[in-house]
Each structure stands twice: as C-alpha cells, then as structure tokens.
Image (cartoon, helix red, strand yellow):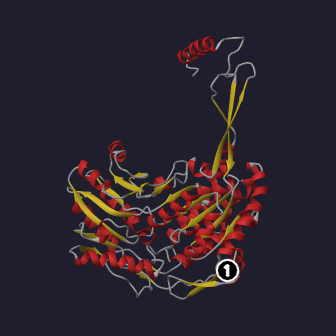
Amino acid sequence: MAVTLGATRTLDLGMIERVVRQVTSSGKTQTITAPFTGETLAELPLSSAEDVRAAHAKAREARRAWAALPVRERIRPFLRLHDAILDRREEILDIVQWETGKARRHAFEEVLDVAGCTLHYVRRAPGLLAPQRRAGIFPVATKVVETRRPKGTVALISPWNYPLSLGVTDVVPALLAGNAVVHKPDTQTALSTLWAIDLLVSLGMPRDIWQVVLGDPAEIGDPLIEDADYVAFTGSTRGGRKIAEAAARRLIGCSLELGGKNPMIVLDDADLDVTAQGALRACFTNAGQLCISIERLYVHETVHDAFLERFVRQARNMRLGAGLDWSVQMGSLTSRRQLEAVTAHVDDAVAKGARVLAGGRARPDVGPLFYEPTILADVDESMDLCREETFGPVVAIYRFRDEDEVVERANDTAYGLNASIWTRDLPRGRAMASRINAGTVNLNEGYGAAYASYDAPMGGMKSSGLGRRHGTEGLLKYTEAQTVASQSLRLGFEPILGMTYDKYADTLSGLLKAMKRFRLH
C-alpha cells in the first residue's frame, strides 16, 4: 500500500483569528488538533448557555429586516458564492483537510457540493416561495392563494465528517426562505463553517442572520432548541432521537438525517472493472466517514470471485497519506474516538471468525489516526459490525444467489438511508431499486448520482431519519404554509334568493354532482 507523508502548508493564523470572532462566546476556549499530525491546529472559542441565548436574540433581531427583503434581493450574496468558493477552492481545501484529515479529492467534493447546491436553491427559491394559486371550493367564486412564511429562527446542528458541505448547504435554503439561523457545527471542524460565513459576509450577506455557537451538547443543546422555531440535525441515530424528543415537547418541526448501514448489490451482468472501481469510492471515500457510504457488499455468486479479486487488489493498492496534494486516495480518520470504534469493530469480527481480505489494521506510521481500507469476509450475526454502523473504511462482502434473496437481505436492517445497484440492464436495476427500502438508490454509482441531483429529495427511511434535504422539501421545510381564501359575496355557504335549507341542500348537491361530471370539482 502506497503512502504519502507530510502536509507541507499550514493554515494562516490571521485568517483563523479573523473568522473565530464570529462565534458567540464569553471567553472560554478549546484546543483542536490536526488529525494528520495530532498537533495543535487552533484555539476555538466556546459558548455557554447564556451565549446561545444571546445568539438567538441577535438572530431574532436580524431576521426581521432579512425576512422583509424580496427573495430576489436575499439570493444575491448566495449567487456570488458559487463562483467565489470555486475561485478560492485552494484556501478552503486546505482548511477542510487540516481539520478533518480527509484526502484532497474528497475535500473537493465538499466545495462542489456547496457551489452546486447553493446555485440550485438560488435558481429555485423565487419560484418556490412565490404565492401559488390553488383551486377553491367553488370555481370563480372562491379564490385561494397559498403563501410561504419563514419559520423564524432555525437551530441547525451539523457534524464533523463533512463540515463545509453540511455546514453550508442546509443553512443556505433556510436563509433564502427568510429565516435566521443559530448554527452549532462540531467544534473540531468549525473552521470550515466560519470561513464560509466570512466569505458570504464579504459578498453582501448580513452578518447577524447566521449565528454560530460552539460547545458540548450537554451544556448548550437545551438552550439551542428552546429558543428555536425549527431544528435541522445531521448526525447519529441516537442523537437524532434526542433532538426529535426535544422538538416534540415544544411542538416544533425537525428534520433529521441520521445513520446508515448501506448495501451495495452487484448483479451477475455488472461490468466488474467499472464496479470494482466504483466500490472503492463508495466504501472508502473520506475513510468511510460518510453516512451514505457502503458497508455491506452483496455480489452474485457467479461473479463473486472475479469481482473480489479486482476489488481486493485495488483496495490493497490505495495510496494513503497526510498530503495536501491530489495523489492521495484516502486520508485519515478524524478523531481518536472514531479510530477506536473502527478498531473495535474489526477486532471483534476477526476474533469471532471473520477473514481479513485487505487492510484490518491501524497505520500510525502514516499518522496517528490512519486505518487501512478494510474488506472482511465471513461476517455473521455474532459480530458487532454485522448490523451496527461502523462509520469507517470497513466493508463486509457476501455472496447471494437470486434477486429475492438479496433484496430481503439488503432490507434486513434498522436503517434505510442509501443503496447502490450495479448492472448493465438499467430497467432491471430500476425494478430492483423499487423494492429497496432506502431514501436514495443509485444505479452504477455508490452515492453521488442521487446525492448531487439537488432537484430530487435526499434523506432516510426507518431509523435513518425524518424529512429530506434537497428538492422542494429541502427549502419549503423551513417555511410555514398559509392559505388565504376569498369568497364572492354573492355566492357563499348560506342559502341565497330566499331558498329554504332543504331547497339549498338539493340545489348544492346537484351543483356538486354537475361539477364532478365536468371535472370542475
């Protein structure tokens, strides 16, 4: 396995000092370290419960003027963001790599996501938020308009694994809808969010509509939700349940994108060279720290051995490294806790009889948190990683005989976030996809085709979450629908022209039947 050692560029201290001023904090700080080296990366301010309440107060004040702006004025700084982030990609790529430890090619996916998703909502927001005519109960006599009003203040909690992508693309539609946001990114990877806010302010975004707080959820989680009008959360299923309970107590809405134990199915007609390369990306992007990453790989028995030979060979030849160049194929895990979780899953499986076909060990010679891309066979129900999400560079491979069997096995999980099917026969693949209980299903791709198609919704079934990001719902979830109906004074819901109620009932019943016949009702 090839190795690249040593990141050569460091982050600009002036930039760090500038962007951290955006955190609402009364002075307490926390040191974050670089996953590549274990050395100090930055000193970040932390927020207290009172700081969170202060952030909410500033957001509430700022949102009044922001919500009063026409949508076409609100979108302007975000339209500028598309080109600006692409032009300054080298700067933000360094930040993302230093705080997460991921490979540069995987950090670039975050830049592309922010640019693409933001542009999608900039283009769609004016139409989605415009008043919509709806059919009234009586044609001509009843006129109905549906309007969209912002929720108010959105509390957004984003994770450490994709800090730029998930720290920006869920906030943008909330702001475009006229809300203010109080955002708690993970402290380890907050620099990406703070850099993006700094950039947007320079592009014309009012500073106070996007507030940032940092700290331990045990200390600031309650005040974050107590003053919010809606909560958006991306993280673990365990954390999502707590968020849902807190939101339910206040009768406010929430959206939750949670964990997954995602299956990939290789059918007997798949192009094995293309599929093996696709599996490499599907399983090991960002060292497997991706909620839509593949952790279960089912291969038809007639092509199992041929596919496995290709897949194992490519996994063993992946280039690991702590470099800021584009040659590295897989970077580091982000935290000691994640390294320990991955190690525990693999060690438990091996102790109970699983075979290691590739990887299976940490690589402290490369960096303190590196773990090799790992392929396991003979995984069974006695092993923790059989059903639990690993969230690391580990995949279990299984044989299957027929389609009914593999669909049942793919669906035999508490999760339902993402799935992948590989076949040359697309109608066959789509038919199988319709039987998979997952929010997104990709054909001949691991995750990117569905995730990056921003016009379509993305989210989970079962224990993988509630609600959707992307698509129409990805913006309208941050709004309240209001129906305004006006009724003609000449035709209402009372008898007219001196009718008795029995005559009115006969007349109205006949009218409704006629309207049905002529498809007016």
Residue 15 vs residue 485, the one in the foreground: 485
Is residue 336 found left or right of 84 in the rendered image? left
Residue 247 screen position, x and y as percent: 56, 59
Q: Does residue 290 show up?
A: no
Residue 455 screen position, x and y as percent: 55, 48
For label 1, count other residues whose C-alpha is less than 10 Å away and answer few (under 14), some (14-19) or many (20+). some
Residue 158 screen position, x and y as percent: 56, 66
Q: Does residue 44 show up?
A: yes
Quadrant of the image containing the N terminus: bottom left
Residue 341 screen position, x and y as percent: 38, 77
Q: Quadrant of residue 419?
A: bottom left
Q: The residue under label 1 is which amino acid type?
A: Ile
SS at mark 1?
helix
Q: Residue at x 78, y 51 (%)?
A: 68
Residue assigned mark 1: 16
Q: Quadrant of residue 418?
A: bottom left
Say above or below: 392 vs 260: below
Q: Residue at x 20, y 55 (%)?
A: 302
Residue 186 vs residue 4, the one in the foreground: 186
Q: Residue at x 35, y 67 (%)?
A: 388
Residue 314 vs residue 151, the one in the foreground: 151
Say above or below: 87 vs 343: above
Is residue 15 found left or right of 238 in the rendered image? right
Quadrant of the image containing the C terminus: top right
Say above or below: 140 vs 224: above
